Image: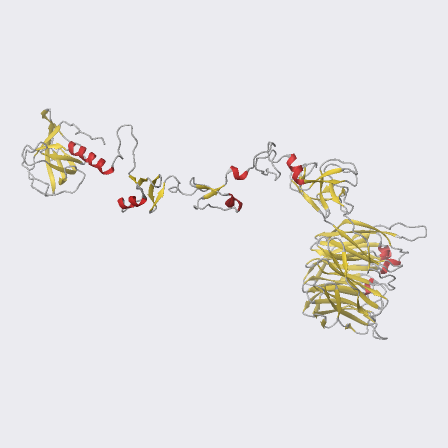
Amino acid sequence: MATYSNIEIKVKGFLRTALAKEASTTTIDVDFVNEDDTSTAITLQSDTLMFEIDPLNKTGKGSEICLAASNASDTPQTDRTRFTTVVRGISKEGHEQTGSATRARSWDEGTEVAIATGTMAKMVNKLMEEVGDALQDDNEALQLTVYATTTTRDAAITAPSNGDMCYVTAEGTAMIYQGGAWANVDTGAAKVNASTTVSGVVEIATVAEQGSAAAAGGTGAIAVPTVGNLVKTSSGAGDENKMAVLDAAGAWADGFISASSVNQHLTTPMTTGENVTAGNALRAKIDGLVYKADEDPVKGMQRTLPAGVEGVDSSGIASCQIATDKTVVVWHDGAVIEAQVFIWDGEQFTAGTVATIDATAGAVNSNRAIDVISHATDAFTVVQWDDAAAGVDDATAWACTVATTTITAGTPQVIDAGTQTQGSGHAVCSPASGKVAMLIDDTADSKVNLIVGTIATRTFTLGSAVEVSAAACDQYLDITEIGTDKVVSVYRDADDDLRARVATISTVTCTQGTEVEITDAITLGHVYVEKVEDDKFVICYEEAAADKTWLVVCTVSGTTITKGTPVEIGARGTLEIANILYFSDNKIAIVYADDHGIETHDGTYPYTNWAVGWITTAATVPTVHQIARLDLDLGVSGAAARDYAPILVKVNDDMIQVVWQEITTFYIYTQNIADNNFIGYANSTITSGNSVEVDLMFNSSQTGLTTGAQYYLADSGAIATTGIVPCGTAVSATKIIK
């Protein structure tokens, strides 16, 4: 350890105040002179300093070290220095600053006084002895006090303060006392955690922490991933080891994902069934080939129902969904009402056993005279007349339940006695689970009645019949719910015009609003009504004399109807081939004849061109989107098909079913239409019979797209900004993401 000698200073002074032996003295006056020229007086500047009385022990008493807390020059006379608040009897080394009368002396005026340079050197040396080698010689680093272990550190530093530092050999690091605890400096624990605004400590995330998206690591610091955990080693592709990001338009940024990578992971090769052009929207058919997609998706197989039953010798069929992928078909075999349940497994139907609903109900002469609705999952209600005995002729309902495909029919429930014939119209809807609203054509009394009932298992509780119209409707009526407590009835009036009326329901009690004439000066034929959404409905009706089919959308406030303008959709009214079905809000399935079919030499129309699609509405304006065309050989002659209108049934969220009856043999058929068969886009232009890569995620072969716009399938592989089947969103003028 280096030792420092006294610091030379050629200043000495003489006491002008005699001093007693004491620990402190209020004031001491001293005259300082130049040691080499005692005639030259020196006045010290104001400072706190240490000085020594009789430094050379000329009095024989030994010297005394004092500390002047402050001093004043030229006091009490010019060239004199006065020390105030003087601490006396300080230790010789000067490292203790407490005065001691024991170490103090009494001194006479004139005793020599010197600046305590020697004591200052001793104090430095004493400090160095206490702190070891912390203070080094010139050009050497400052060294902290070293402790072997944290135990020896704690024994030496019993009351640490924030800011204390040392080095602990066992820890291999310097340590700092911060926040009331010792911490290793090298881990960064002495710093705050990093944030978006503060630089600080972070922790490298483990693979497990990265996989679980942990915000912090084990130490509590922010967890950050390493490049090794983000990017795999490149196998050669220039952009393979980069993170994929989106550009401002939401598309993959150029250079971050390669075309080869896209083709490898996001396309699939398929054989074409026709010539396709790069960018064409494609669909897959049951033959395993791809074709240009449009609003005409794959049509399912035409099926004869019920299996093995031929020559059903009476008209009148009805059908409805009773659960997801489960439907029921009800039909007449003479006077017998029969039914069968079908379950769709994604590829084909499984048929249950044909059940008899009522063996003596009586035949009907059209599909308008019988109706069915699901009033709960795996439960349905059938309505028609019951001619079980001469003169009965009652409007009747049957509540049925289903276990898998087995039907159990309830006993007939008369809903309006002695009012019916085989041509009386019946319609039913279910405004809430376990509740039905039934609209009947009271032929005997020439009026239309509404009856509401609740159903427990297969037992009805009925309300009173409410008159809807004071005129018979000649079978032309229908009813739909437009909320859980509201229904709308549509029917033909005494002038053959179309009218509608809203009723609210409380349990089984109906309160009707004002009747509204929807159309005037027509001869109303078939009429169907379906909910569009709560308090909005659409009517599909036939103007029989003009051979036209129309749609009209109406809104409801309370029980007040506001009608829209009718829109013509087909000139095939004579055959009455039209029907509608609520599928979801603002999406209504429709089947109709949009032209006159193919006429043969004998004046018949054996091939009827049915269009199937969706209706959407904007306010009270309907738009029809065709998704399929069914060219069917029905054996139809002239207007004879008016009694055999097709029925639409929901199978699941992606499939509707058309049910109809061929009038010459009375076979019953179904055909499924799905609107979700779009699979992707052609990656290149390929001729029929060759393999094309189908882009399953996005396609960059488009032109003229509007960035951010939603696109829909159009005709022949084209896409458009309007439609019913969505096919993607444009992210640039040439790129669409499916």
367 left or right of 344 in image = right
- Residue 134, given in percent of the width and then of the height, sits at 27, 35
Residue at the top extreme, as displayed = 36
- Residue 205, given in percent of the width and then of the height, sits at 48, 42
Quadrant placement of the C terminus: top right
Name which quarter of the figure residue 635 lies in: bottom right
585 left or right of 311 in image = left
The foreground one among 341 and 604 is 341
- Residue 687, given in percent of the width and then of the height, sits at 78, 36
Above or below 623: residue 445: below
Above or below 490: residue 103: above
Q: Residue at x 29, y 44 (%)?
A: 152
Name which quarter of the figure residue 527 lies in: bottom right
- Residue 198, given in percent of the width and then of the height, sits at 43, 41
The colour scheme is: secondary structure
The foreground one among 210 and 103 is 210
144 left or right of 250 in image = left
Quadrant placement of the N terminus: top left
Count numbered badges in the picture: 0
Above or below 417: residue 298: above
Q: Residue at x 75, y 41 (%)?
A: 717
Above or below 213: residue 525: below
Residue at the right extreme, as displayed = 602
619 left or right of 628 in image = left
Q: Is residue 215 visible?
A: yes
Q: Is residue 710 visible?
A: no
